[in-house]
Image: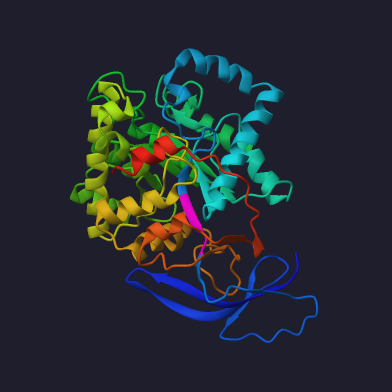
Amino acid sequence: MQTTVFRNCNYIDLNESGYTVTLCDILVDHHGLIKEMAPHINVTEPSCVEVSIDNKYILAGLIDAHVHLFSSGGRLSVSDKPGIMKVLNRFLKTKVGKNYIRNTMHKNAHTQLQSGVTTLRSVGEFQYQDVTLRDEIINGDRDGPNLYVSGYFISIKGGHGAPYLALESDGPWACRKSVRKNLLEGVDWIKICVTSGVTDARRIGEAGRLQLNLEEIEAICDEAHRVGVMVSAHVESSEGVRIALLGGVDTIEHGAVLDDTMIQLFKNNPKALRGFTALIPTFSAAYPFALLDKEKTELSDVVYYNGKRIYEEMMEGFKQAIDHDITVGVGTDASMSFVKHYNFYRELDHIVRYGGVPAYKALYMATRVNACVLNDQFIGNLDIGKRADFIVLNDNPAENVQVLKEIEAVYKDGQKVIPIPINKDDEIDGLLDLT
């Protein structure tokens, strides 16, 4: 990499209560880190490259704290058809299959990157190909976003994601063994499934049913925390949130309605690695079920009514969390049905329109807060010593997040991301535009 100075940048600096826009130059060293930010930077290095941003807006790269990369996010997930999934799982264990799924994951990760998401936390993939892909990106063998990875879920036998996407684990010692297996494979996070989900529920009202118990959650968190690794928990019921918090998880994925005890545990959780637990709602994976006509989505009655209830409880819990100053990040659950990898802006737009959060705060949650959740001090905003991950826009997204649909350019470690064609799904986008 060469040293680069970016001139005439209208940098949007976000905070919890607002934002500022500062016209500045940004000097990036050959490691892709910001060396200086000032109204004007005098460059003496002959080889330094100058890039004019032409007074356009720049924003720190977005962070999606809950994604999967194995699918494109079409109308129907393969996992809904067990026979197909059994054959596919057998294929994915082969060398050819591993290469196929890793190439699919890379394509989807690059789509996210082109859409302004420069960091992803992947929370469940096949055959540890997320670990391999992360390492390939770090080593420069592939271009892509910063990746935090989790490998397989940890679930009970027959639980959420089992048997193909989860290590089936019954009892505390079996759970510890699964944690150790994932850690040995090189994951950054441990992902557990405390409750059932929407698409694997067989009856109306079954989504969100408890699966892991408190003793198992405590064992998982103890095993992970003793080596400094955090635990994320799929949870879709209030009782699930309660025992996940008591067990010491570090993030609650999706969420549900909270009571006063849960609210206090989010803010002060002695069993969590850092003493608090964050909430990562994923509205993009739920609102199509709740807000679109069942005839348009072609969902079964079971999925439709379970999805609608889970969405409503997730939204209520989100509003409670915002009102009580709980740490709340942003995730999409990309790869799930109706959740395309190029549509991160839709999650922010939903938070603004339905969650009642101002545009600047939604962006703050998707940058600074998500960086805090990931415990990564080099991302989330632009400052000296941080990674030069940013997006360039003609209009100000802190006033209207929908301008993120039209991104002028994306820079990763100070290097411009070369776009590749994205096959957008006009049918699904048309449906989502109805919400």
Give the magenta-colored segment's residue range. 60-64
Percent position (x, y) of residue 31?
A: 71, 65
Closer to the camera in the image, 229 or 199: 199
Closer to the camera in the image, 286 or 297: 297
Q: Residue at x 59, y 75 (%)?
A: 384
Quarter of the C terminus within the rendering: top left
**Residue projecting furthest to the top:** 83
Is 416 left or right of 203, judged from the image as shown?
A: right
Closer to the camera in the image, 412 or 157: 412
Q: Residue at x 34, y 38 (%)?
A: 431
Quarter of the N terminus within the rendering: bottom right
**Residue 57 in view:** yes
Percent position (x, y) of residue 174?
A: 48, 26
Specify how the rendered protein is coloured.
Answer: rainbow
**Residue 218 in view:** no
Relative to 393, residue 193 above or below: above
Residue 228 is a magenta residue = no
**Residue projecting furthest to the left:** 260
Question: Predominant secondary structure in magenta?
Answer: strand
Q: Residue at x 57, y 30 (%)?
A: 126
Closer to the camera in the image, 150 or 70: 70
Q: Which of the 4 image quarters holds residue 402?
A: bottom left
Percent position (x, y) of residue 187?
A: 58, 41
Is 413 left or right of 86, judged from the image as shown?
A: right
